[in-house]
Image (tube, grey):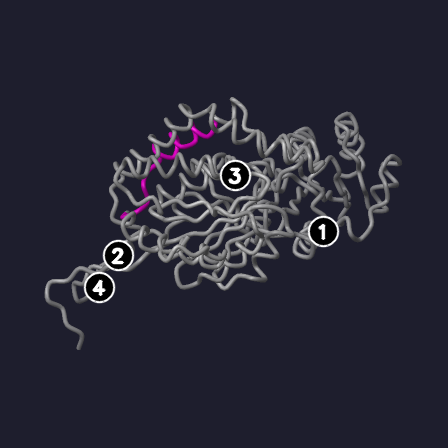
Amino acid sequence: MNKRGKQMSVDEIIEQMAKAARIASRVLARCSTAKKNEVLLNIADKIVKNEAYIKKENKKDLSQAKKAGLPAAFIDRLAIKDATIKSMAEGLKEVSALEDPVGSIVKTWVRPNGLCVSRMRIPLGVIGIIYESRPNVTIDAAGLCLKAGNAVILRGGSDAFYSNQALAGIIKKALSESGLPEEVVQVVPVKERIAVNALLSQEEYIDLIIPRGGEELIRFVVQNSRIPVLKHYKGVCHVYVDECADTDMARKICFNSKVQRPGVCNAVETLLIHRKAARNFLPEMAKDFTAAGVEIRGCSRTCKILPIAKKAKEEDWPAEYLDLIIAVKIVDDMDEAIRHIEKYGSNHTESIVTNDYNRSRRFISEVGSSLVLVNASTRFNDGGQLGLGAEIGISTSKLHAFGPMGLEELTTTKFIALGNGQVRK
């Protein structure tokens, strides 16, 4: 209801939320690190204390998902279990322990006239996050944005509506108890899809949109947003096994990159192998993959070496399988491998396995993805694994962040200059 007691439209609800977030962001930007940590720990404590209530609301979502006949894997991601409660609470505690980037000085230099110029980290302002399914993202995103000094508007999937609203109430209470505006973290309170469109039109109040989910969702956001979007459409990741590779090492890296968790964006989808390494490497690698239930789709040269491989089609090379399927191509040299990555890759993650230092340096220099690895699994493209502590997602767009987005990537820098009376001549 608005002030006149009339029912508000979805557009009006979202605009009101965006305006309130902008006001709240200015308060939060002045907030001390100690106060932000206090709120994070308070939310963590309340999540544990309200476990029964959160699970009760989550059961409403699970019941609707089952009635809708959604896949078991989807329902499993939607479920809030004991481990989920613990993970959400521990995640907030970990974020509270991270160094606060706000106010830190990135670089300082002195001009010939004595003017001292610096770049200082500041919050982005207001962030809108649009995501699907897993309700724990609500807590992860809220915690990271809050610590980085940003107000945030969260629009979760309608399948997790009751779970997200329960978590929103807990966050709101913790903010209020700490003396901060409740509008620092808001969860969209309507299920209608038009709420997404309304959110994407609030360029006057929202500084950045971050979509998390499938390629269809992300493309919809990009096509309809008036606000800058940080995104990655998909993760078509590659491992290139060079002729100078240690084959045992290569087998471990390729296996881990594909099998350890195949349904995530940093799992390898295409394996590129130097022609001189293929005959010795592929048969043993295929045994490992086959034992783990991996389907191999290979080029014509691969199929000659591996009769069990299915003939790859053109659509296999840009495919993000998110499953126990891998495309395999034998290349003549590293030039061909790099050309293949440039043509079919998604700027996400690429790895080279080689004992040749110069080739590794060249691969790093010429491959333009958000993470380029040497002799390591693609599964390391993750904020926690790279030492960021936590991440809001992985960006494959280069403005303003590229790769895993931790606390620093949720800030920007402004120039400050200290003088003692300088005037421009």
Name the amino acid, label 3. Answer: Asp
Q: CA distance from mark 1 to mark 3?
A: 22 Å
Name the amino acid, label 4. Answer: Arg
Circle 4 is placed at which residue position? 111
Instruction: Work out whether 185 lies above or below 13.
Output: above
Q: CA distance from mark 3 to mark 4?
A: 39 Å
Query: Hey, which residue is sitting farthest left in the picture?
Result: 421
Circles 1, 4 touching at the beta carbon (< 8 Å): no
Q: Quadrant of residue 59?
A: top right
Work out whether residue 198 or residue 425 is closer to the camera in this orientation and state it: 198
Q: Secondary structure at mark 2?
A: strand
Q: Earlier in the sequence, mark 1 or mark 3?
A: 1
Q: Count neighbours of disc 2 (C-alpha within 10 A) and say few if under 14, some if 14 to 19, many if 20 or more.
A: some
Image coords of residue 108 (percent x, y): 26, 54
Image coords of residue 411 (percent x, y): 37, 50
Image coords of residue 303 (percent x, y): 86, 41
Circle 3 is placed at which residue position? 382
Q: Earlier in the sequence, mark 1 or mark 4?
A: 4
Name the amino acid, label 2. Answer: Ser
Residue at the (45%, 41%) spot, across then down = 141
Q: Earlier in the sequence, mark 1 or mark 2?
A: 2
Work out whether residue 364 or residue 236 is closer to the camera in this orientation and state it: 236
Residue at the (50%, 51%) spot, across then down = 210
Circle 1 is placed at which residue position? 318
Residue range corresponding to the magenta coloring: 87-103
Mark nearer the viewer, 4 or 2:
2
